[in-house]
Structure formats: structure tokens, C-alpha cells
Image (cartoon, rainbow, N blue to C red):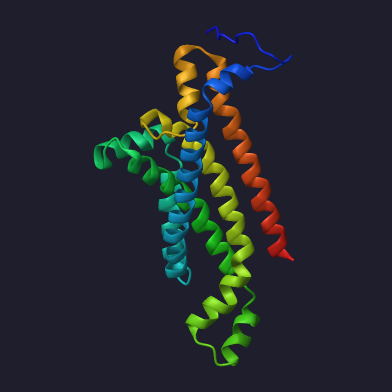
Amino acid sequence: MNFRTGNCLEANSWICAKFISTRQDQLLSALQEHVTLTVETVIIALMVSLPLAIAVRRSRRASAGLLGLATAVYTVPSLALFGLLVPITGLRPATVLVGLVLYSLTILIRNVLAGLDSVPADVVEAARGMGMGRGRILLQVELPLAFPTILAGIRIATVSTIGTATIAATIGGGGLGTFVFRGIATADMRTVLAGAVPAALMAIIADEVLEWIERRFSY
């Protein structure tokens, strides 16, 4: 397949300034959709995974079963998962959101469980000796100590969601993937890169920012 690259204004540059300027509004709208979808996915996945992990963490069998189920979903290719969801939720943005949340659950559940398990037993015993109940110990001792590990999971889930959300454009999910697949369909490399480059930069920025926050909480 031959891609039309056009006449670029800068050497070694695939995307022309004129091409970007004529599609600036569309690109900004797609970027906003991508950011919104990523943020919504990670927040919902965290709200689901946190109580689930807390509920099963004291039972080795239950935690293994939950992780096994989430991992099984995670191994399904993204296009196949979206295709399986369409007959259930319809061809609409909610289908994309459900699929992305399901993918993020494995990462977040695993990290929440790992973070809670890493809390030293003597710290919990000391809190219990001070008269704290199970709820206070969880909120004031265990979750704060587990937060760096949970944050690491949020970081991985965020970067993963940015990439998977690009593929979601195949079922009308919007976002930067719209440009990628439009460019592939029209054999236009400029359009492909107009979607791929911002998505890659978005993933890099999110990773760097969350890594910085993670380091701050690790000290």
C-alpha cells in the first residue's frame, strides 16, 4: 500500500503545517474525546476494582478467582471484545467505555491486592492495639500505605487505555483513532500520523506525570 505523504514544509517531517491547520478543530475535538474517554475509564475501573479487591483480599480462593476472571477478559483481543459487546450494549460510546473498563480491571485489581498485601502485619497489629476498628485500619493505615502500588496500577492502566482507545474508533468510539483508521482507509500517511502522534505523546506525558506523582508518594 502506497501512502501519499504530500509536500512537507520541514525536512524529514511527514505532516504538513497546512494539513494540520486545516484540521485543527477536528484534531482538538478528537484529542478531547480521547482524554475524556481515558479519564472516565480509569476512574470507573478504579471505583469498581477497589471495593472488589477489598472484598476478596482475605480469601485466597476468592482473590484468585477474581484475578483469573479479570485476566481471562484481558486476554481477549480488543476488537473481538468490542465485537462481543456490540450485541449487548449496542453500537454506541457506552460499548467502548465498558470494554476499556474491563481491560483496566485486571491491572487495577492486581495492584490493589498487591498493595494491601504489602502492608506490614506489625503495623496493622499496632493500629489494632490502639483501638482502631477494621474500617479505620483500612482507611487510615492500609490504603495510605498501599497507595504507591495502587498508583502504579493507575499509571499502567492509563497508558494502556490510551492505546486501546485508539482501536475503539473502529466501532465509532471517536478519539484520535478516527484519524488513524481514516488514514489507513484512504492510504494517507499524514492522516494516520495526525492521530497516532498525538496519541503517543499523550501516553508519554501521562506516563511521565503519573511516574513523578508515584515517586513523590514513595518517599
Image coordinates for residue 146, horizontal then vertical, percent: 60, 67
In this view of the protein, which residue sits in the foreground, 70 or 82? 82
Residue at 52% in and 8% down: 1
Q: In this view, does 153 lie above or below 159?
A: below
Residue 143 shows in the view: yes
Residue 154 position, x and y percent, is 56, 54
What is the x, y in percent for residue 15? 62, 18
Report the residue at 65% width, 43% height from top.
205
Tell me: residue 195, above or below residue 187. Answer: below
Q: In this view, does 215 lie to the left or right of 60?
A: right
Residue at the spot x=64%, y=81% of the render? 123
Q: Answer with left or right where residue 63 lies relative to residue 131.
A: left
For residue 190, side relative to residue 52 (left or right): right
Q: Which residue is drawn at 68% across and 64% down?
A: 217
Q: Where is residue 70 in the image (x, y as percent from the top left)?
A: 43, 51
**Which quadrant holds the C terminus?**
bottom right
Corner quadrant of residue 189 = top right
Query: What number of labels is visible?
Result: 0
Q: Which of 173 and 71 is in front in this view?
A: 173
Q: Residue 72, can we see it? A: no
Give the side of residue 142 with respect to residue 33, left or right.
right
